[in-house]
Amino acid sequence: MKVAVLYGGVSKERDVSISSSKGIIQALKKNGHEVIGIDFHPDHLNEIIELKVDLVFIGLHGKFGEDGSIQGLLDMLQIPYVGSGVLASSLAMDKHTAKQLFASKGIPVAKDKRYRIIHSNQIASVVEDIKTTFTTPFVIKPNSEGSTLGLTIVFDENQIETAIEHANVSDEFILVEQFIKGKELTVPVLGKIGEEIALPIIEIIPKNELYDYESKYAAGGSEHIIPARINDIETEQIKDYAVQAHRALGCETYSRADFLLTDDGTAYILEVNTLPGMTSTSLFPDSAATYGITYEEMIEQFVQLSINK
């Protein structure tokens, strides 16, 4: 088939997108497809409007890539694409709304509250409300941002204002969330609608104290243990939660759900990634390999699931 791979974009995850898409393009070519790479920019939409391809593989992350925007454009142009549609993509990017949906399905979520900050003179009142609503430690982060960008763990109330300003750079909506201490786990989900399966759970041990941007994307930034060192009951429960979350959002083809597992055995879902990273250090390919699926086979499965849905 003739496949266009959209990469780059304008979000703060541009570099990750470029790295992911290199692997995707190579795999598609190895699988015998004709591939066109497009460095996507909203100012150059004619490149998309004039596309004559069988399928678009979205290798973008963040704003205009993962939030339903490009999916809506491709839907209007009636061009098939890999991955979730407009609604699932936008819901997953809105962490607060997604968590409400997960909670309605009985999936544990951390206590949180969303604030909208348009002007700096609003910050003082938000600081006071946070002090009355949460006790340290808690997390302040952008409501719609990936790769832990703009995230601060607040251990002292004197950090609140700076943490808000840091998160507000990326998003006018900020999310304050109860801090959960536990094992970092992530679960890839793959399959046709209604028949999705969870791949082996990955336990993540970051080299830094926080599983931050560097830990995620720098070589040696984190250790991936597959399968995760958890018992069978926890494994099945978390896999079930991941599939439930995928379906609750209306995701298609593939996704990856992130969890924190506490010492008492409670698995709190953090978020679902509708376009998880596909770099050489990414989690989804690592899990697929453990399941017996090579990188090229995984990419081809995404293609076939998208064409045949």
Image (cartoon, rainbow, N blue to C red):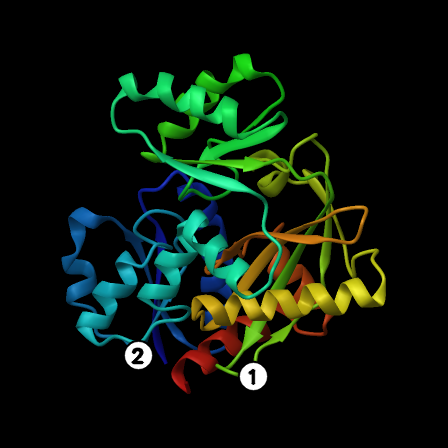
Quarter of the figure that contains the C terminus: bottom left
Quarter of the figure that contains the N terminus: bottom left
Residue occupying the far front of the picture:
132
Q: Residues within 10 Å of mark 2 (few under 14, many from 20)?
A: some
Where on the picture, by quarter, is residue 257?
bottom right
Disc nearer the start of the sequence (2/1): 2
Relative to 190, is 13 above or below? above
Disc 2 target residue: 54
Give 83 or 51, whichever is nearer the viewer. 83
> Residue 252: x, y in percent?
45, 73
State the residue at coordinates (41%, 53%).
Answer: 97
Q: Is residue 82 left or right of residue 43?
A: right
Q: Is residue 196 left or right of residue 42?
A: right
Q: Amino acid at mark 1?
A: Glu
Question: Which numbered marker is on residue 85?
Answer: none
Disc 1 target residue: 195
Q: Give the structural element (helix, strand or loop) at label 1.
A: loop
> Residue 180: x, y in percent?
67, 39
Q: Whole-Å distance between the Cαs marked 2 and 1? A: 25 Å
> Residue 161: x, y in percent?
44, 17
State the residue at coordinates (50%, 56%).
Answer: 273
Q: Give the structural element (helix, strand or loop) at label 2.
A: loop
Relative to 304, is 213 above or below? above
State the residue at coordinates (44%, 19%).
Answer: 128
Residue 189 shows up from this direction: yes
